[in-house]
Amino acid sequence: MSQILIIYTGGTIGMMSDPKTKVLRPINFEQIMENVPELEKLNCKIKVHSFEEIIDSSNMNPAIWSELALLIKENYDSVDGVVILHGSDTMAFTASVLSFMLENLAKPIIFTGSQLPISAIRTDAKENLMTAIEIAKAKKNDRARVPEVCIYFDYKLFRGNRAFKYNSSKFEAFRSPNYPILAESGVHLKFNINDIRQPADAPFKIHRKLVNDVAVLKLYPGISQKVVETILGADVRGIVMETFGAGNTTTDKWFTDLLKNAINSGKVILDISQCKVGTVELGRYETSKELKDMGITNGYDMTYEAAITKMMFLLGQYEEPLIIKEMLETDLRGELTVS
Ligand code: ASP
């Protein structure tokens, strides 16, 4: 019989509306189980780990990410898969960071949650939870069908580091426009075998060190020198720069000089696009040629969530800016497509 570990961190899935204030607050896992008697009918053994402090995922942080990685490591050999119940607001960050922290993963780690609490009559939580468990235990020839960190939501399975929350009111909360979905649930559970990563033949290991010395520079026409100076001058080692279109920025001299100074002072500047679909192509336009020449890092088609967490992960692993740049531009866990 399959063994599944459910880790409950919080989120709307396990919230209840306070009868007096009507504010949504987290409840404990036993109360969740009461709402899903179907769990008993699943042909698997479920072990539950509930975090001591159940949170709205807006309070997620690197210390909890590190705890999650450790928990997975401690249970890795004894389970077939893991389901993590997590608020949808920051689910894509947690799924992304775990994809980097877990190396040579050969078992499914499936994040899910819901837009309505599990106790609500029209809830989307039950389908999300039940199918996430089905996916976590799915095997073919004794091997996990999806040995990846994924997000399952509203009938679709996404690669975790390719997805982002794009809708706060529809059940279809996530999208992954730069990478195909890994599976779809309907009458049958259909896996897109060709798009699922296969594990390397190497021992599973975790990396728990994350460094949050990261700032974000989101460009807009008219951004002032003092704002750019403040962000690039912040006491951080990595900057995620959200640029226009295919990775373009203004060519104003004050701006490119500030970028050069930041790089010369040892900062790594990662260029990702504000567009949700498509990729950064440094050097395609005149407005990005200079960026390429000065040593700006190409983020290709990475999501914002993957870019931030990959930076935190690599800052924790390496000191040398050029190595961090090289690793950022390398596909580590299926998070980017080098074009
Ligand atoms: N605010 C909630 C959270 O992220 C929303 C959700 O679960 O969907 O924890």
Image (spheres, rainbow, N blue to C red):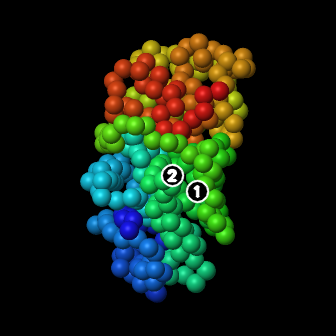
Checking the image for residue 157, the label placed there is 1
Q: Secondary structure at mark 1?
A: strand
What residue type is disc 1 on? Leu
Could you say which disc has been placed on residue 146 in the image? 2
Where residue 90 appears, as percent x and y from the top left, is 49, 55
Q: Residues within 10 Å of mark 2 (few under 14, many from 20)?
A: many
Residue found at x 59% / y 12%: 293
Q: Position of residue 269 (x, y in %)?
A: 50, 26
Q: Earlier in the sequence, mark 1 or mark 2?
A: 2
Q: How many marks?
A: 2
Query: Is 277 displayed left or right of 147 in the figure?
Result: right
Q: Is mark 2 within 8 Å of ligand 1?
A: no
Is the CB of the residue bearing disc 1 within 8 angstroms of ligand 1? no
Residue lying farthest right? 285
- Tell me what residue is drawn at x 39 percent, y 58 percent: 80
Q: Nearer the viewer, residue 203 or 309?
A: 203
Query: Residue 145, which numbered label?
Result: none
What is the C-alpha distance between the residues marked 1 and 2? 10 Å
